[in-house]
Image (spheres, grey):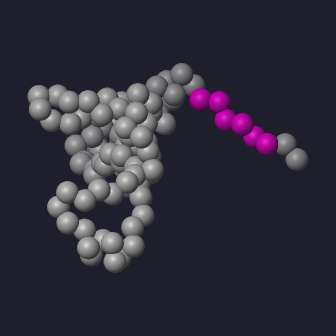
Amino acid sequence: MTEATETMEPESKNSAIKDGALRASLLDHVEIGCEAVLGSGSITIGRLNAMAKGDLLTLDRSPADPVDIRVNGKTIARGEIVTVDDRFAIRVTEIG
């Protein structure tokens, strides 16, 4: 059994690329939630209930480790924490 393969004419390829770009641009204005994850830890409910201002929750990463950038719970990039105009920001160092 042989498998048929389609070949597109250059005009058709350009049209398909333009259609794909148009469809993608239709979503450019849609906002999505994004989170930067510094690390994680675990705690008992008893300790959580007893926590007070100034208590520490130890995370599983060091400050030098990259921060995960997540969209819908999926890591899409990594970066490092920086400050910009007295605010925290993430400089993207890896995508994918």
Residue 44 horizontal/vertical position (percent): 39, 73
Residue 84 horizontal/vertical position (percent): 17, 28
Q: Quadrant of residue 51?
A: bottom left
Q: Which residue is drawn at 20% across and 66% down?
A: 52
Residue 36 at least partly seen? yes
| In the depicted structure, whether residue 53 falls above or below residue 17 | below
Residue 18 at least partly seen? no
| In the depicted structure, whether residue 85 falls above or below residue 2 | above
Q: Residue at x 54, y 22 (%)?
A: 10
Q: Residue at x 51, y 29 (%)?
A: 12
Q: Residue at x 41, y 28 (%)?
A: 93
Residue 86 horizontal/vertical position (percent): 11, 32
Residue 80 horizontal/vertical position (percent): 35, 32
Left or right of residue 60: residue 37: left
Q: Which of 34 and 40 lies nearest the eye of the viewer?
A: 40
Asked if the magenta segment contains residue 47, the reply would be: no
Q: What stretch is highlighted in magenta?
A: 3-8
Q: Which of 15 and 44 lies nearest the eye of the viewer?
A: 44
| In the depicted structure, whether residue 69 falls above or below residue 51 | above
